[in-house]
Every structure is written in C-alpha cells, then in structure tokens.
Amino acid sequence: MKIAGIILLILGLIGLAWFGYEAMQESESYEVLGAEVAVSTANWTPVIISGVIALIGLIMTVANKSSKT
C-alpha cells in the first residue's frame, strides 16, 4: 500500500506541474482603458484531478506509516 501511495503521489505531482503549466499558458490579454487585463481560458479540471490524486497518494503513504506503530 505504501508503494501504491508513493506512485500516486509522484504521478499527481507530475500532473500538477504539467497541467498547471499548460493552464497558466492559456490566457488571453486585453487592453481596457489603458490597463492590460489577462483572462484565463484554461480547463482547470486536470489540475484539480492531479491534486486529488497527489493528496490520496500522500494520505496512503502517511496512513501506512502510522498504522505500523
């Protein structure tokens, strides 16, 4: 269970980095009244799912350590 937790944690963190970078790059800038306004057009669902997977992996890893004591 600890190995599965570590794998989920690593995959979740990689997904957060990958999809987070892509989401930050998907923005459009507009100039309104002399001020530049950036609007995000990204789909944040993969970022949220990656975060949940990383959190589940962290919980699995920590729960396995605490159950052995």
Image: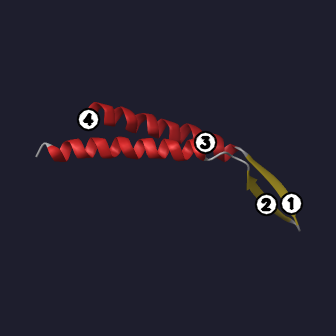
Task: Give coordinates of residue 69: x percent, y percent.
Answer: 10, 46
Of helix, strand and loop, which one carries label 1?
A: strand
Residue 63 x %, y % = 24, 46
Labels 1 and 2 touching (C-beta < 8 A): yes
Residue situated furthest left in the rendering: 69
Residue pointed to by mark 1 = 31
Q: Position of residue 56 (x, y in %)?
A: 37, 44
Mark 3 residue element: helix
Comparing marks 1 and 4, which lies closer to the viewer?
Answer: 4
Is tag 1's residue or tag 4's residue first in the polypeptide sequence? 4
Q: Residue, x 50% and y 41% (percent of image)?
A: 50
Give the spatial CA distance, label 4 vs label 3. 28 Å
For the point 13% across and 42% down, which residue is it? 68
**Residue 54 relative to residue 69: left or right:** right
Marks 4/2: CA–CA distance: 45 Å
Examine the image and state in which quarter residue 46 appears.
Answer: top right
According to the image, label 3 marks what residue?
21
Which amino acid type is marked by label 1?
Answer: Glu
**Vertical placement of residue 69 versus 10, above or below:** below
Location of residue 62 in the rendering, given as x and y in whole percent from the top left corner: 26, 46
Q: Which residue is mark 2?
A: 37
Report the Cα–Cα distance between label 1 and label 2: 6 Å
Badge 3 density bin: few <14, some 14–19, many ≥20, Cα 10 Å: few
Q: Residue at x 87, y 64 (%)?
A: 32
Outermost residue toward the right in this view = 33
Specify the label residue 2 is tagged with: 4
